[in-house]
């Protein structure tokens, strides 16, 4: 899509596809967006950067080569909103696409242990990353859980443990 904005009349026009259109010279600003963008994180020369460094739940570290394809919305309302937020295709790729890919990958990896992934769970990690990129990050909360032995009595907060053992 090509977005052409006219500051004199405070409006914008959006052109989809290979249509022919005329724009007045020296009036307004033209921004071109690609319909589909592939973000690649690997060690080859034709990519956006190094593989993503991830950490698993059991504190092991790894690098994850990724390739993700993003597609722009086809309706004008969402395209105008994207253009208003990012103002250029390069800002969209660097500020949203690449950052989202890295953040989702790192966040998803913390939900897996290295043992799970290296013993056949790589497809599960890939599908979880894909799901969270499409539908948004899962909100998780890490809590420490202490399981009490069944032979001990319940002690309420603020109660002295010696008094509880005397009651039995």
Image (cartoon, rainbow, N blue to C red):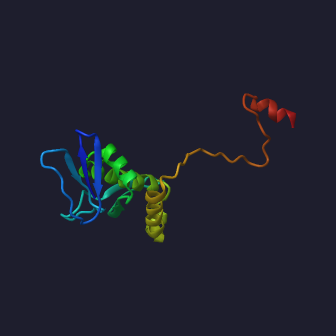
* Nearer to me, 16 or 120: 16
Task: Describe residue 122's horizontal placement relative to residue 36 as left or right.
Answer: right
The residue that appears at 49% across and 59% down in the rendered structure is 112
The residue that appears at 28% across and 51% down in the rendered structure is 13
Task: Describe residue 43's horizontal placement relative to residue 107 as left or right.
Answer: left
Q: Quadrant of residue 129?
A: bottom left
Furthest residue toward right? 168
* Nearer to me, 55 or 152: 55
Furthest residue toward bottom? 120
* Nearer to me, 138 or 152: 138
* Nearer to me, 97 or 21: 21
| Residue 41 in the image, given as x and y percentages of width and height | 29, 60
153 relative to 136, above or below: above
| Residue 158 in the image, given as x and y percentages of width and height | 73, 28
Q: Quadrant of residue 66?
A: bottom left
128 relative to 26, above or below: below
Query: Which quadrant would the C terminus be assigned to in this image?
Result: top right
Task: Describe residue 85's horizontal placement relative to residue 135 as left or right.
Answer: left
Query: Which quadrant would the N terminus be assigned to in this image?
Result: bottom left
| Residue 149 in the image, given as x and y percentages of width and height | 74, 48
The residue that appears at 24% across and 66% down in the rendered structure is 18
User: Is residue 43 in view?
Assistant: yes
The residue that appears at 27% across and 45% down in the rendered structure is 87
User: Is residue 119 in view?
Assistant: no
């Amino acid at each position: 899509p090509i977005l052409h904005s006219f500051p004199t009349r405070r409006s914008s026009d959006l052109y989809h596809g290979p249509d022919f259109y005329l724009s007045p010279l020296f009036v307004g600003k033209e921004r071109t967006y690609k319909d589909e963008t592939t973000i690649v994180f690997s060690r080859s020369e034709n990519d956006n950067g190094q593989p993503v460094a991830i950490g698993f739940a059991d504190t092991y570290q790894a690098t994850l080569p990724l390739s993700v394809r993003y597609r722009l919305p086809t309706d004008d309302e969402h395209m105008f909103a994207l253009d208003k937020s990012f103002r250029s295709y390069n800002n969209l790729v660097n500020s949203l696409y690449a950052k989202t890919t890295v953040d989702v990958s790192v966040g998803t990896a913390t939900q897996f242990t290295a043992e799970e992934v290296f013993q056949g769970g790589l497809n599960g990690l890939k599908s979880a990353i894909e799901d969270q990129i499409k539908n948004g990050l899962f909100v998780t909360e890490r809590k420490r859980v202490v399981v009490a032995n069944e032979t001990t009595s319940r002690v309420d907060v603020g109660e002295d443990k010696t008094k509880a053992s005397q009651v039995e």
